[in-house]
Image (cartoon, rainbow, N blue to C red):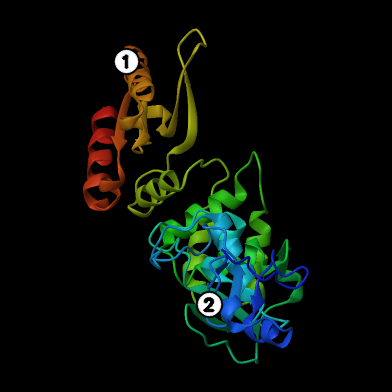
Amino acid sequence: MTARIPLPDGWADRPFRIGDAVRAGVSTSRLDGGDLDRPFWGIRTPATGSATPAGRPQNYPARRSDVEALCRAFQVRMPKDAFFTHITAALVLGLPVPGRLARLRPLHVGCVAPGRAMVARDMVGHSLRIDPDDLVDRGPVRLTGPARTWLDLGALLTRGELVAVGDYLLYWEAPILTRGELADALEKYPSRSGLTRARTALPLLRTRSESPRESMLRVIIVLAGLPEPECNYRVFDEQGRFLARGDLAYPEYKLLIEYQGDHHRTDRAQWRADIRRIGRLEDHGWQALQFTDDDLQDPAALVARIALRLRARGR
């Protein structure tokens, strides 16, 4: 077997443009080698089998490392002042983007207005008014920072989804930014698409929510006009012994409201622990209402169940 012709020094571990390679003396046949991926037209990257494997559909669920690799590849054909934004920025930042949008492609690429938005296959271009201070670097990848990214997501997410991202940013044990920084972004960019949704989401953000679905469940309850439950409430018995912690709680009604992900069903140990936990709560006069993702798709029925239980417990 004939050995592959080596690429120029430094080219075997980074993305590059075909045109630059040809000018450096690399043959077109060498550029078709199996050790190189083709993530975009006119670009080659070292084949890793992760970022853009052959045959992977565009709606393949995105991993953060895959998105970063794709961004590094596309960057070689981006203008120097361009940056990643919207869903792409959120994925690189590790924000909880809803599954329907957490995809490798298209990439969202911004440029500073009044510059024209980029146009290319597998990407969405944006021309944005933005302060340089609202851009950050994650390694070689430049993108919008957390506050501006949250604001831009207002044009793409539902209010509940936007609250879930905001709760993640404010989470008290490891806050990424403050509520004030989000409020400043709203004032700084008053003409952004999705601004109304972001403004209505901001008052709903809380610092103690621990999962996106929990945040969305809370938003459904509050927007329906029910009293707002407490987040991640710790329940103790009359002797001060810890019984359980609930996602959401109405302490005065001794009622817990919980979102149950699939792991509560598929993990045998978790399933057994949940049964023991509910038993302990019931022994001390508490009740628990449990909801799944299916329930979130029918907010009216979900709210009706909670309201019924609150009325019954309020007697």
Query: Residue drawn 72% across and 70% down?
Result: 11
Name the amino acid type tagged 1: Gly
Looking at this view, is 62 or 194 the one in front?
A: 62
Looking at the rendering, in which quadrant would you find the C terminus? top left
Q: Secondary structure at mark 2?
A: loop
**Residue under circle 2?**
40
Q: Secondary structure at mark 1?
A: helix
Picture coordinates of residue 33, whole percent (x, y): 56, 71
Looking at the rendering, in which quadrant would you find the N terminus? bottom right
Q: Is residue 223 left or right of residue 63?
A: left
**Residue under circle 1?**
279
Give the label on residue 292, or none. none
Q: Is residue 230 left or right of residue 100?
A: right
Picture coordinates of residue 66, whole percent (x, y): 54, 59
Q: Earlier in the sequence, mark 1 or mark 2?
A: 2
Residue at the extreme front = 1
Residue at the extreme top = 239
Picture coordinates of residue 80, whole percent (x, y): 73, 82
* Quadrant housing residue 173: top right
Query: Residue drawn 65% across and 91% down?
Result: 115
Work out whether residue 186 can be spotted.
Answer: no
Residues packed near mark 2 inside 10 Å, few (<14), some (14 to 19) or many (20 plus): some
* Quadrant housing residue 286: top left
Whole-angstrom CA distance, mark 1 to mark 2, is 56 Å
